[in-house]
């Protein structure tokens, strides 16, 4: 994987440095995410100790492929190996009737938060529901996406994804390689379908609202697996999301974002599991370079791994614990976080702070199947993050 | 009631129809109000025009709103400022999914100021490799912008070439007359020393002989720092500089701090059409700027 990354990178640099007679501009950004955190989790070797961590290193490469579309690669490491987190082609200005197509490996637009990279989120990491339902990288998958902009006055878009889908069965969606290595976990190669409809409307000159409705349908455990009870087990999910943004002037903005997910799982014993989770946050940006905010998480299951920022956990661990929340309709995790940030120069140098209090509602310890979870105590996390980035300007999204 | 419904139906039909009278207009979207204003002079009633940045907002940072994408998806022509000022427009154009859109760069043929001699990096702040992009503030550049808009309009609507050409000639003639008038009127401003917030005024100062001594921003696009503000205070005191020019979208904080320490006047001036009450077109912009500066000059 490291070799793939290095050869890709050197290929890009090679073409940039004028060996090709006609320079084709490619934008490259490098991003480092350095953290210092401490938590109070009993039993953790890091309890009450400051921990330094290079939580991520990312390379983002994008450029036009032709007059109609662009190609994008996001290659990153979160500790061990480099991997292609995203690699896709977008064809935006070729098809008629407001259609566009995207194909490759990308962040799936199930809800709106998963579309953002974690370092672009003001609170450093994906919300708990994104991790429980969408995996480590929050709905990252290979597939094809078709978009249609509706021919009405307001901006409205309908998006349909046909996805590889194995992440739905297994833990770490981000770790799907080109090979079908997790097929054996899902027991089928049938695609998973998702769709999102969103509508964007201005409430006033300086206030905008985006509303989205997403759905997902697919087999999460095929009949070939023993654990399926001999039939294909389907997952049906829905997500309602919104973003409200008020910008009283160019350098002040209040954004309020919310996302709620409902999840229905067929089970081998014919007793389906239904659960839900949500996240909502408010973020105030002020004086151009500052922001402060608050976030509330509520999710099914016991969201557990060695301290919120530890990336050193294997798929098995996540499978047994974290994402088991998909199948837990009795116990819950909730968290409240306060966050803030300051940038010396927009996009390039960013310092953030986070305080998170996380607690659990354990109604049925027997279903957890793991004593480590049944006596989970509330935990407190303090973190500081430095994000530094080299590369061209990026426009401000809504 | 019946009438209301029939009006509603008519409006609906018109808005869906591609053949109505309204639909014959060339739909033009411009990045800024200045370009939109000049385009209006060339296209008159044969075009419909709107701009994405308002005259009061910072043209360096326009949010990429889906509603802009929708607007551009229906357009025939997009007019860019160019020189990386409206780099955000690329994402809006991409998001518009408009395969028929004609894109024109209005900076074609402009002689840029402040082109960096070495390679640009972030230590210089937000410096554009193509040079200073605020070229609309030299009225002579209005001719070049108008010429570019004319070429673009002819490219999308060749049938009306004659109409656009006549409007271009009329605009150029009027602009020449106005430039003569402005230069005469602004003669007392020659040699006037000012501090500006951002480097928005380089072309303007060249055109009218105003001397920009320094900027409130330590580097383009970088927020004022205490040390630079202190330097400015000393500079203003020693050179007796009478005026800080501030664009409407920047914060008053640093200029006010400097004003309290030195007694310097802070004047908010719009670098774009729509940035102040009476500034309704490209001509009114220079009228307003010159009159405002003359008032300060007289007071002092
Ligand atoms: Zn500028």
Image (cartoon, coloured by chain):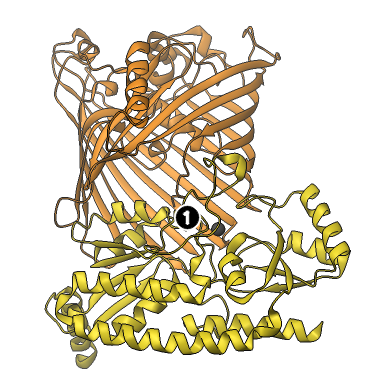
| Camera-nearest residue between A319 and B156 | B156
Q: Position of residue A374 (x, y in %)?
A: 52, 13
Choose top left, top right, bottom left or bottom right for residue B39: bottom left
Q: Residue at x 45, y 72 (%)?
A: B141
Chain A shade in the render: orange
Ligand 1 shown in quarter: bottom right
Mark 1 belongs to which subunit? Answer: A
* Residue A171 shows in this picture: no
| Camera-nearest residue between A341 and A359 | A341
B177 up-or-down from A380: above or below: below
Mark 1 Cα shell of 10 Å, populated few (<14), some (14-19), many (≥20): many
**A283 relative to B212 in the view: left or right:** left
Q: Residue at x 20, y 25 (%)?
A: A164
| Camera-nearest residue between A138 and A227 | A138
Total labels: the figure holds 1
Q: Position of residue A46 (x, y in %)?
A: 65, 11
Q: Which chain is yellow?
A: B
B2 up-or-down from A41: above or below: below
**Disc 1 target residue:** A244
- Helix, strand or loop at mark 1: strand
Q: Position of residue A397 (x, y in %)?
A: 44, 50
Q: Position of residue A85 (x, y in %)?
A: 35, 25
Choose top left, top right, bottom left or bottom right for residue B78: bottom left
| Camera-nearest residue between B277 and A36 | B277
């Amino acid at each position: 994987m490291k070799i793939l990354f290095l050869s890709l990178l050197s290929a890009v640099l090679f073409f940039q440095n004028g060996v090709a007679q006609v320079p084709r501009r490619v934008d490259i950004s490098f991003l480092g995410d350095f953290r210092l955190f401490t938590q109070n989790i009993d039993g953790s070797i890091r309890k009450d100790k400051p921990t330094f961590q290079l939580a991520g290193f990312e390379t983002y490469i994008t450029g036009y492929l032709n007059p109609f579309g662009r190609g994008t690669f996001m290659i990153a490491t979160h500790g061990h190996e480099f991997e292609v987190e995203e690699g896709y082609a977008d064809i935006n200005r070729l098809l008629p009737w407001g259609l566009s197509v995207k194909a490759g490996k990308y962040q799936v637009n199930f809800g709106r938060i998963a579309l953002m990279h974690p370092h672009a989120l003001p609170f450093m990491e994906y919300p708990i529901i994104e991790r429980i339902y969408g995996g480590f990288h929050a709905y990252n998958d290979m597939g094809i996406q078709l978009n249609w902009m509706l021919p009405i006055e307001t901006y409205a878009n309908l998006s349909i994804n046909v996805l590889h889908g194995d992440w739905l069965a297994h833990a770490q969606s981000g770790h799907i390689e080109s090979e079908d290595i997790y097929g054996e976990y899902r027991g089928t190669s049938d695609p998973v379908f998702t769709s999102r409809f969103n509508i964007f409307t201005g409430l006033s000159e300086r206030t905008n609202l985006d509303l989205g409705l997403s759905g997902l349908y697919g087999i999460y455990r095929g009949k070939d697996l023993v654990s399926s009870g001999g039939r294909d087990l389907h997952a049906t999910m829905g997500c309602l999301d919104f973003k409200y943004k008020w910008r009283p002037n160019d350098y002040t903005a209040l954004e309020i974002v919310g996302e709620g997910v409902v999840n229905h799982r067929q089970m081998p014993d014919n007793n389906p599991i239904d659960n839900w989770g949500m996240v909502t946050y408010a973020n105030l940006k002020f004086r151009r370079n500052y922001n402060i905010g608050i976030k509330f998480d509520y999710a099914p299951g016991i969201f557990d791994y060695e301290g919120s920022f530890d990336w050193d956990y294997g798929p098995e661990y996540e499978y047994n614990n974290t994402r088991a929340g998909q199948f837990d309709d009795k116990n819950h995790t909730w968290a409240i976080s306060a966050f803030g940030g300051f940038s010396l120069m927009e996009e390039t140098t960013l310092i953030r702070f986070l305080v998170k209090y996380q607690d659990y509602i354990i109604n049925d310890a027997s279903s957890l199947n793991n004593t480590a979870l049944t006596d989970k105590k509330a935990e407190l996390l303090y973190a500081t993050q430095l994000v530094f980035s080299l590369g061209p300007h990026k426009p401000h999204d809504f | 009631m019946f009438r209301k419904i029939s009006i509603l139906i008519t409006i609906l039909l018109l808005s869906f129809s591609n053949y109505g009278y309204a639909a014959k207009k060339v739909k033009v979207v411009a990045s800024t109000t200045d370009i939109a204003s000049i385009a209006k002079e060339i296209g008159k009633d044969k075009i419909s025009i709107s701009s994405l940045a308002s005259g009061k907002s910072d043209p360096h940072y326009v949010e990429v709103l889906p509603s802009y994408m929708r607007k551009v998806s229906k357009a025939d022509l997009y007019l860019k400022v160019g020189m990386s000022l409206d780099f955000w427009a690329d994402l809006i154009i991409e998001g518009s999914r408009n395969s028929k859109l004609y894109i024109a760069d209005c900076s074609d043929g402009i002689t840029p100021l402040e082109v960096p001699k070495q390679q640009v990096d972030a230590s210089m702040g937000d410096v554009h490799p193509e040079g200073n992009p605020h070229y609309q503030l030299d009225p002579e550049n209005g001719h070049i912008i108008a010429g570019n808009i004319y070429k673009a309009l002819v490219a999308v609507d060749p049938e009306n070439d004659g109409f656009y050409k006549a409007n271009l000639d009329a605009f150029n003639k009027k602009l020449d007359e106005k430039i003569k008038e402005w230069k005469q009127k602004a003669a007392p401003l020659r040699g006037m020393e000012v501090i500006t917030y951002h480097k928005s005024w380089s072309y303007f100062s060249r055109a009218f002989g105003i001397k920009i001594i320094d900027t409130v921003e330590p580097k383009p696009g970088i927020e004022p720092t205490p040390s630079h503000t202190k330097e400015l205070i000393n500079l203003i005191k020693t050179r007796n500089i009478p005026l800080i020019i501030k664009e409407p979208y920047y914060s008053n904080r640093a200029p006010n701090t400097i004003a309290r320490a030195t007694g310097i006047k802070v004047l908010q001036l719009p670098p774009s059409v729509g940035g102040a009450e009476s500034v309704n077109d490209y001509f009114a912009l220079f009228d307003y700027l010159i009159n405002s500066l003359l008032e300060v000059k007289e007071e002092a």
